[in-house]
Image (cartoon, rainbow, N blue to C red):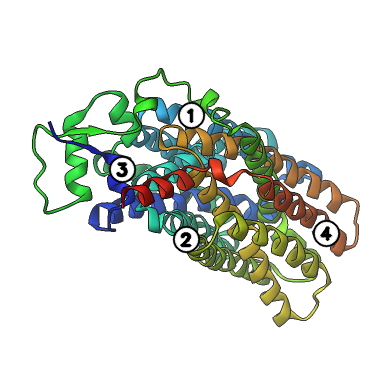
Amino acid sequence: MQSVNIYALVGDSKFNRFHGRILFWCMLILIIDGYDLAVVGAALPAIMQDMNVDPTSAGIMAGSALLGTMLGAIFLGTLADRIGRPRMIAICVALFSIFTAVAGFTDNPVSFSIARFIAGLGIGGVLPVCTAQMGEYSPLKLRTRLITLVFAGYSVGGILVALTAKQLIESYGWQWVFYVAGLPVLLIPFILKSMPQSIGYLLRNGRQDELREIVGKIEPGHAVADTLVVTGNVAMQNTEATPVRDLFKQGRGFSTVMIWTAFMTGLFMVYALNSWLTKLMAMAGFSLGSALNFVIVFNLGSIAGAMVGGWLSDKLSIKHVLVCFYITGAIALTLLGYTRDTTALFAVVFLVGASTLGTQLLAYAYAGDFYPSEIRSTGVGFASGVGRIGAIVAPVLIGWLVSLSLPLQQNFMAISLAGLIGALAVTLINQSRAQSTQEKKALALSR
């Protein structure tokens, strides 16, 4: 009886329309996700004025969604490995679309924070699921680039906020940037119809017909016999799934903790800037329109950083590339506080975007690259979830620093320290335990 290891088949495959469809959906979902998360940062000055709240309270309001993203990433990301990724993606899209729109109807900090917390569950939950889905179906030679391309959608969402926020807020009020976020709920039926089920889920449930159909899509033009047996990682198939515990097995324990640490520092930098970049630029004397232009440049930089980082990581060691990016982020943030020339400031903001948000997008790709497919959603979900501790602390801490009326440089230097800690954490990860390292060894032996 003929059999095929589907993971080896995917790893050695060539990019085709099937891969492209997964890339399209994952990237579109991350564009929407990025909009929903960045929208608070753009609207924060108007919200503070309308609700009459101080910077510390505004930081807590911004952080409420981040608490939701932490819980969503941990629990919904892990649950996706049990109920299937397409279903979980649909649940997350419903949560962040509906409740981001609901936030626009609130008129006080408490109800706003509650709506953003619930939206945050979906925002955080969809990130690890899309990472795992793209990573599972990507050819090995393109995996990092495809995952970072998916996460570039996150930055496109931030750009959409910056492009639309000024006009919507000035013409209709801050509420409208939240109302439009409810539209993506209409995509849910199409996501459920078009997104393939995860390979690990199909293997665990013995759904051979669907697995053979996927084999045919991975290698179009090749006849797939009805008697073909599709296999995967035998050791994982024959044991009861305990994905959280598996993050610490086979020598992965210390590296898992270091990945969590790197995520905490990376997300600290990202969310400190997402929540307060517009306000900090306004404090430096720039108008709302000019401050939002910096947000656009920041997100363009993150796309460039993710693309360059993904390309370098597929050519070199993703671990070494990530370390360099964290260090560059720390340096760029320090420079941001001391740059006064407007043209030079745009260049520095671009570099900051490339080496902070761009670095975090690369970190997601690295986590997806590190864990085996069977626990990939769980691995990325827990990294993203635990990392949200840094995301939650960031807007509150920076809000407190802003309330102290410290020099602008000190605010940016406080953010930059996280980059150095992140670089150290990634340096300590044992790359020999990464799934991509094991796959490369297996491919080398099979040739």
How many residues crowd around disc 2 within 10 Å: few (fewer than 14), some, or many (20 or more)?
some
Give the residue furthest to the top: 240
Residue 36 appears in the figure: no
How many residues crowd around disc 3 within 10 Å: few (fewer than 14), some, or many (20 or more)?
some
- For label 3, the residue is 191
- Please name the amino acid that badge 3 sits on: Ile
Q: Mark 3 or mark 4, which is nearer the start of the sequence?
A: 3
Residue displayed at 73% across by 67% down: 332
Q: How many marks?
A: 4
Task: Name the front one of labels 2 and 4.
Answer: 2
- What is the C-alpha distance between the residues marked 2 and 1? 27 Å
Q: Mark 1 or mark 4, which is nearer the start of the sequence?
A: 1
- Residue 314: assigned label: 2
- What is the C-alpha distance between the residues marked 4 and 1? 35 Å
- For label 4, the residue is 413
Residue 362 appears in the figure: yes
- Please name the amino acid that badge 2 sits on: Asp
Q: Mark 4 or mark 2, which is nearer the start of the sequence?
A: 2
The x and y percentages for residue 296 are 58, 67
Task: Name the front one of labels 4 and 3.
Answer: 4
- Please name the amino acid that badge 4 sits on: Met
How many residues crowd around disc 1 within 10 Å: few (fewer than 14), some, or many (20 or more)?
many
The x and y percentages for residue 432 are 55, 44
- For label 1, the residue is 78
The x and y percentages for residue 279 are 74, 59
In the shown orientation, is residue 419 left or right of residue 42?
right
